[in-house]
Image (cartoon, rainbow, N blue to C red):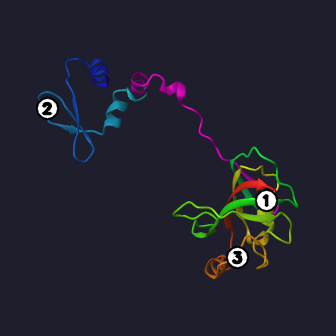
Amino acid sequence: MAMEIAQFVIGSSMKLSLGKSRNGVSGMTRAGLSSVQLPRRMFMQLAGLGSVLTLVDFPGLAAQMKEPQVIRTLKLPSGVRIQEILQGEGREAHEGDLVELNYVCRRANGYFVHSTVDQFSGETAPIKLFLDDNDVIEGLKEVLVGMKAGGKRRALIPPSVGYIKETLKPIPEEFGPRRSLLSHANEPLVFEVQLLKVL
C-alpha cells in the first residue's frame, strides 16, 4: 500500500523499487539511472508520506496514543527528593507507626549498595521499622510518612539526613554489606522503597 501511494504521489512514469541492503539502508532505483542510496525514513519524508503512512497503515494508532506519564520530583526542605512511582491504596503511614517494607539502596551514580530484594532470584526479605528519629534515618522517615501501603517511591537522600549514626536503620546485618553501606554514608544515597504494610 505504501508503494502504491509513493508511485501515485511521485508519478506513474517513475517506477521505484525499495529494498533493504545489508547495511540497513534502502536503495531507490529509477529505470535507466544508477542506484541512489537513501534511508527509508528520508525517502518517505522527501515524498511527504511520513505522517500519512502512519495514519493510512494504522488508522487506530493516532486514537490509541496517550501522553507519556511524567514522574514529578518533590523536593523537601531537608533536601530529600521524592518521586512517586506507584500510588498505594492501603493504610497511610504516620510518624511513630511500625511499617514493613522492601528497599533497594544505591549510590547516586547507580551502583548497588544493599537491598531486601535478591537481585537474581527476586526473593524478598522485608524489614520492619518504627518511623521515629531513633530507629530509622531521617530522610527515609520523610519518604515513608504519608505513603500508603502498596505504594512505591524513589528518593535521593542527602548525607545530612542519612546515616549520621551507625545504629540507624535500615542497615544490613552481614559484615560485608554493612561495611559497604557505611563507607558510602557521606554521599547521597538513592532508596527505592515499596511499603508493604502499616502495622
Give the mark nearest the N terminus, 2 or 1. 2
Question: Hey, what amino acid is under mark 1?
Answer: Val
> Which stretch did the figure color magenta?
52-78
Q: Is residue 51 left or right of residue 69?
A: left
Q: Nearer the viewer, residue 30 or 184?
A: 184
Image position of 98 with respect to 3: above or below: below
Q: Nearer the viewer, residue 58 or 136?
A: 136
Question: Hey, what amino acid is under mark 2?
Answer: Leu
* Alpha carbon separation for disc pair 3 and 1: 23 Å
**Looking at the image, is mark 3 or mark 2 nearer the viewer?**
3
Element under disc 1: strand
In the picture of the structure, the residue carrying the numbered disc 1 is: 99
Is residue 114 in view? yes
**Looking at the image, is mark 2 or mark 1 nearer the viewer?**
1
Q: Residue at x 86, y 66 (%)?
A: 132
Q: Residue at x 75, y 52 (%)?
A: 74
Q: Is residue 63 left or right of residue 155?
A: left
Q: Which mark is residue 185?
A: 3
Q: Nearer the viewer, residue 2 or 167?
A: 167
Q: How many marks?
A: 3
